[in-house]
Image (cartoon, rainbow, N blue to C red):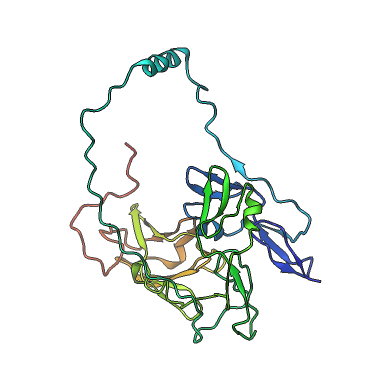
């Protein structure tokens, strides 16, 4: 009999008790507009990004573990941490009468509002294949697509079309009036709107024109044409960085050639990205002595020069700046 896992960040229906469960063991943390989980470092600003934070822990599914309580950070009492002199000064300032202004303040002209983005498609593109296990994109629905299942107008997608609202401890959606206090209760608020079909992938084009000239592959990956790079050098080595967050170190491939580096860098984002490129280098390198490492926000490669010359640029197809580059790390100031 299928059971639902209560771990936060999982919530899957399962039948195999030994199946790997990916979840967040810590409570959610909302502080000064930032949202995240206490158990990991990722912090985002919007609620949709918060729901897409990848689970940080692996274990077994459970139907009995109680979800942890939400952590609330408060600024403490108003007078806490103030010296006696500071409190005395504050009380004197409070006694000073404030005269009314003689003229009304002039309101600054408002900046023109940015044009609203085009509305997202409310129907799945029938020409695109839906990946097995894809969860409905609408808030509070949670339906999962099973490969090969028939689609019809009787699917009954119950969801919230509005945005999440967190105000003075209460939580709810802008599309309905229900408000709760606890985060786990908020996640269980039933949808207030019913659509005939679920929305698993939409048009598939909402991210096809992303930054850096990205496109979308048949597998749904965002293919990046370029990423930001930087480098510094020593007399024998060039240390270059390719900035890309959440690189999947288990699938990343880096091959060194006599005068180029070939990289294939997929990410672990909910909407996965991939950067594939053959980077022509300014000078020759020794592939056997080159190394690389995947960090949280970038790929760092150490390129061993064969001739010991100074590189004015990293890539051979880059235009030289004419500047004299320092060899080694710059000192701190």
Q: What residue sits 55% from the left and 50% below the top?
A: 36
Q: Which quarter of the image is occupied by the C terminus? A: top left
User: Is residue 224 visible to the viewer in this orientation of the structure?
Assistant: yes
Q: Is residue 222 left or right of residue 187?
A: left
The furthest residue to the left: 322
Q: Give the residue displayed 48% in from the left and 42% down from the top.
A: 32
In the picture shown, does residue 51 fall above or below 106? below
Residue 313: name its quadrant: bottom left
Residue 119, image x, y percentages: 41, 70
Q: Tell me residue 264's x, y (percent).
A: 46, 71
* Residue 116: percent from left, percent from top: 35, 64
Look at 35% across and 46% down and name the residue there.
Answer: 329
Residue 254 in view of the camera: no
Residue at image location 73% in from the left, 62% down from the top: 5
Classify residue 232 as left or right of residue 144. left
Q: Quadrant of the N terminus?
A: bottom right
Residue 139 appears left or right of 314: right
Work out whether residue 150 or residue 254 is closer to the camera in this orientation and state it: 150
Q: How many marks?
A: 0
Compared to 171, does 293 lie above or below? below
In the rendered image, residue 41, in percent from the top left (x then y), is placed at: 54, 49
């Amino acid at each position: 009999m299928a059971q639902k896992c209560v771990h936060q960040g999982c919530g899957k229906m399962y039948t195999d008790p030994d199946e790997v469960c990916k979840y967040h063991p810590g409570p959610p943390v909302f502080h000064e507009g930032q949202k995240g989980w206490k158990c990991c470092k990722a912090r985002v600003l919007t609620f949709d990004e918060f729901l897409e934070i990848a689970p940080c822990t692996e274990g077994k599914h459970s139907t009995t573990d109680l979800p942890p309580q939400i952590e609330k950070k408060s600024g403490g009492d108003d007078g806490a941490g103030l010296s006696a002199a500071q409190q005395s000064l504050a009380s004197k300032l409070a006694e000073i009468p404030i005269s009314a202004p003689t003229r009304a303040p002039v309101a600054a002209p408002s900046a023109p509002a940015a044009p609203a983005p085009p509305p997202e498609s409310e129907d799945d593109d029938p020409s695109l294949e839906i990946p097995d296990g894809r969860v409905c994109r609408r808030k509070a629905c949670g339906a999962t697509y099973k490969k090969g299942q028939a689609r019809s107008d009787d699917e009954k997608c119950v969801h919230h079309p509005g945005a999440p609202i967190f105000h003075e401890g209460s939580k709810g959606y802008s599309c309905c009036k229900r408000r709760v206090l606890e985060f786990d209760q908020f996640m269980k608020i039933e949808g207030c709107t019913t659509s005939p079909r679920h929305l698993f992938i939409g048009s598939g084009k909402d991210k096809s024109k992303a930054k850096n000239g990205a496109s979308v592959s048949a597998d749904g990956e965002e293919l990046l044409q370029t990423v930001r790079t930087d480098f510094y050098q020593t007399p024998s080595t060039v240390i270059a960085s390719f900035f890309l967050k959440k690189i999947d170190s288990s699938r990343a491939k880096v091959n060194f050639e006599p005068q180029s580096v070939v990289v294939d860098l997929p990410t672990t984002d909910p909407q996965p990205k991939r950067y594939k490129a053959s980077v022509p280098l300014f000078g020759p390198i020794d592939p056997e002595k080159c190394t690389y490492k995947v960090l949280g926000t970038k790929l760092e490669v150490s390129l061993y020069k064969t001739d010991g010359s100074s590189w004015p640029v990293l890539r051979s197809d880059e235009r030289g700046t004419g500047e004299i580059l320092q060899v080694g790390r710059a000192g701190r100031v």
